[in-house]
Image (cartoon, rainbow, N blue to C red):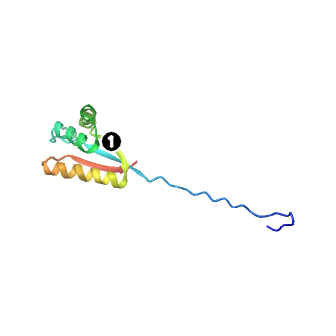
Amino acid sequence: MGDDGDDTSVVVETRTKTKRPPLYKVLLLNDDYTPMEFVVAVLERFFGMNHAQAFEIMLTVHKKGVAVVGVFSHEIAETKVAQVMDFARQHQHPLQCTMEKE
Ligand code: TYC
């Protein structure tokens, strides 16, 4: 950029792409052996649901075979799955919990 009035400078705009972190659905699976009350307790304890919400989601899993119980970042989803699986194992229930990319 001189001072001769002949301004031919190029303005390069940079756009920073901020990618949102991918989200993961945490899924609860039905089985024939885990007691309904245990599943309700899991949903209250690890997913912050009140009793009515927890009961409703438990029934959805019971009837449909699977339901999304929450959507989280990879790390949080992994933690929730591990917590549910550990808790179920401790109580010797076959309850299964998994995650999948949204
Ligand atoms: N099907 C179980 C029963 O009849 C209840 C159940 C619900 C189990 C949801 C697992 O994710 C589940 N005792």
In the picture, measured across the screen, residue 48 lies left or right of residue 73, that is left
* In this picture, residue 36 sits left or right of residue 16: left
Residue at x 84%, y 66% (from the top left corner): 3
| Picture quarter with ligand 1 | top left
Up-down relation of residue 22 to residue 58 (above or below): below
Residue 78: x and y in percent read 31, 54
Q: Quadrant of residue 55?
A: top left
Name the residue type under label 1: Val
Query: Seen from this angle, which residue lies furthest bottom?
Result: 2
- Across and down, in percent, residue 15 comes to 61, 57
Residue identifier under label 1: 68
Q: Position of residue 100 (x, y in %)?
A: 35, 50
Secondary structure of residue under mark 1: strand
Pick the front one: 55 or 4? 4
Depth order, front residue of 4/66:
4
> Dot 1: within a 10 Å radius of its alpha carbon, few (fewer than 14), some, or many (20 or more) residues?
some
x then y, percent, for residue 51: 24, 33
